[in-house]
Image (cartoon, grey):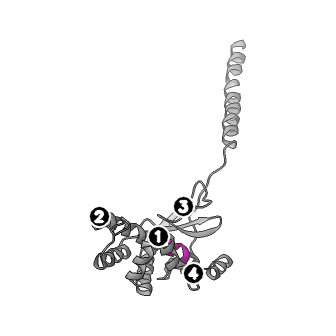
Amino acid sequence: MLHEVTSEAMRLPLPLLLLFGGKAILGSLADKPFLSATAPVLDDEEKFASYIPAHLRCDACRAVAYQMGQHLAKAEAKSHAPDSSGLQELSESIYTDVLDRTCSQNWQSYGVQEVNRMKRLMGPGLSKGTEPSISVMITGGPWPNRLSMTCFQYLGDFGEDQIYEAYRQGHETLEALLCEGTQGSCSQENQVSREEL
């Protein structure tokens, strides 16, 4: 009988050890913030429209301006005809071709992400701001085609010459040309209506 009591006594510490060990593990997990992420829930316009929804147009414009600037900078770096300021000025045929290729790219690195309960277009050239430490971004689908169409629309609206001239004055000037102004996607009026959504 004494042997059975000893056997029971030896079994007791293991569950207690697991209980106390489990609390120690849970306690250390509770010290760290809980991270969770869900994909943004897209409405019908965001899923099916052929255009960029109004609340994402500023982000789309900034993405297009960034890509135009990146492609033009690469082309200038390859050029061997510096102008008086030491920059590589492109011929009209080259910058026209570069801008056309910019709009024709696949745009796969862009997508929609929910940040602070607000859907944002994310990708290269778009500031992350106060982004959560973990998030889900929806890429592909209609976004590449929408960005390509937006890019070509800007080429039609402003023309390659005006876009290249703005680029030569700096990224801020290019972004201002495409995105600011009274009708620009990032204008104050459009920002107010975007925040109301």
Q: CA distance from mark 2 to mark 1?
A: 18 Å
Q: Nearer the viewer, residue 3 or 84?
A: 84
Q: CA distance from mark 4 to mark 3?
A: 21 Å
Left-right relation of 38 to 2? left
Residue 116: percent from the left, percent from the top?
65, 64
Disc 1 to disc 4, how far (Cα)? 26 Å
Q: Earlier in the sequence, mark 4 or mark 3?
A: 4
Check disc 1 and report the residue beneath it: 170
Q: Which residues are magenta?
A: 57-62
Q: Could one spot residue 51 in this view of the protein?
A: yes
Circle 3/circle 2 CB separation < 8 Å: no
Query: Does dot 1 land on a helix, a strand or a loop?
Result: loop
Look at discs 3 and 1 and give the one toward the viewer. Answer: 1
CA–CA distance between discs 3 and 1?
Answer: 32 Å
Residue 60 visible in the shown view: no
Look at the numbered disc 4 and give the secondary structure of its residue: helix
Please name whichever residue, 151 or 69, is drawn nearer the observer in this view of the structure.
69
User: What is the number of the mark on residue 112?
Assistant: none
Mark-to-mark CA distance, 4 and 2: 37 Å
Q: Residue at x 44, y 87 (%)?
A: 157
Of badges 4 and 3, nearer the viewer stands 4
Upstream in sequence: badge 3 or badge 1: 3
Circle 2 sits on which residue?
A: 78
What residue is drawn where x is 57% and y is 67%?
40
Q: Quadrant where the N terminus lies?
A: top right
Of the image marks 1 and 4, the number of the one nearer the N terminus: 4
Residue lying furthest top:
2
The disc labelled 4 sits on which kind of residue? Answer: Ala
Q: Mark 3 falls on what kind of element? A: loop
In contact (CB < 8 Å): disc 1 and disc 4: no
